[in-house]
Amino acid sequence: MNLEQLKTLHQVVECGSISEAAVRLYKTQPAISMTLKRLEQEIGFPLFDRSGYRLKLTPKGKIYVEKSRSILSQMAQLHSLSESFTRGEEHEVKIAIEDTANLQQILPQLVPIQTRFPDTWLNLNCVHMLNALAVLRNEQADLAITPWLVTFESEGDFESKRIGALNFWFCIHKELAAKHGIYTASDITLEKLNGIPQITPSELALNVEKTNIMRKIGRSIIKIDEIRCFLAALESQLGWGPVADTAWTETMAEQFISFNIDQQSTMAQSEIRIVKNRSHILGPCAQAIWESLPLTPRS
């Protein structure tokens, strides 16, 4: 059994006759008949019932054709894969995405890219604590989607493009706040915050110590390194802490009081950027992703 025999078999089944299959395959009818006969001899049973005017698959023939269809489909995919690699398309594109990024806006833009490059695997690595740039810097990813501060320019030879805004503020559950005499944002003072446990990110991969995100106010500190656990801790009233606008929901607006630490300061205002190593030449798929995530106007 070989692929040429299977292709001939399926063409005969599709056409319903040897004569029409011969025309499509640019072969003679005797050549088609001989191919089918040799295939039946090799597998040990007849594929067609030839007693009628037209060829009809036997019960075993129907099963054989159905099973062999998947083989031909896989061979077609393999051929397509070979062609895509010949054109220089990557076998895989690795993207490190920070969990603070707005995935609901970003991921849908990858759909047409995946459709355009079906043979290229997309490996989306969701990271936290600003490790996306560290992964990119170590060449463990082709692209990074991450919060961005101007100071990050010194962390590597990066080229970046703004794809969205990212803002942070502090919040505290209303029930926890009420226990400390806080009912609105105007009731909040540093003295009151000092008496409530403060939830902060664990040590970040990059230096943001000068931002309010890492400013230590509370006497009791709770460090968490993953956003889902961070939000759960806030909801469980373990303490107060920062939250990104991408994680803020209508439900949270009903349950929490949002605030800045003091009147004169604001939370860290950064951007979400797509970043690549300047010295690394992207393949066609990665380049398409880079180009598909557009610059957005500043608010």
Image (cartoon, rainbow, N blue to C red):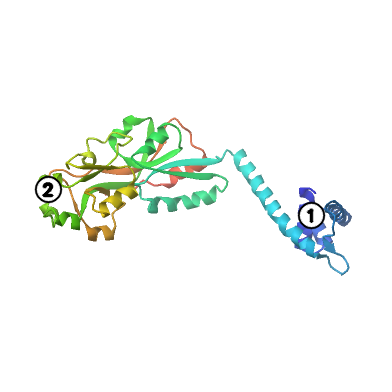
Residue 161 x %, y %: 37, 41
- Are dots 1 and 2 in contact, CB under 8 Å? no
Q: Amino acid at mark 2?
A: Lys
Q: Amino acid at mark 1?
A: Thr
**Residue 270 placement: quadrant:** top left
Residue 291 versus residue 234: which sits nearer the camera?
A: 234
Looking at the image, residue 85 sits to the left or right of residue 169; the answer is right
Judged from this view, the residue extending furthest toward the bottom is 52
Residue 86 x %, y %: 62, 38
Residue 165 x %, y %: 30, 47
Q: Residue at the spot x=48%, y=33% of the render?
A: 281
Which marked residue is nearer to the observer: mark 1 or mark 2? 2
Residue 143 versus residue 183: which sits nearer the camera?
A: 183
Q: Element under label 1?
A: helix
Residue bearing the label numbered 2: 192
Is residue 245 at all visible to an observer of this figure? no
Judge whether 18 appears above or below 128 on screen: below
What is the C-alpha distance between the residues marked 1 and 2? 82 Å
Count of all numbered marks drawn on residues in the image = 2
Sequence order check: which comes first, mark 1 or mark 2? 1
Counting other residues with Cα less than 10 Å from the Cα at mark 1, is it few (<14), some (14-19), or many (20 or more)?
Answer: many
Query: In the drawing, what numbered circle is on residue 22?
Result: none
Looking at the image, residue 113 sits to the left or right of residue 198; the answer is right
Is residue 169 at all visible to an observer of this figure? yes
Q: Element under label 2?
A: helix
Residue 240 versus residue 6: which sits nearer the camera?
A: 240
Residue bearing the label numbered 1: 8
Residue 204 versus residue 102: which sits nearer the camera?
A: 204
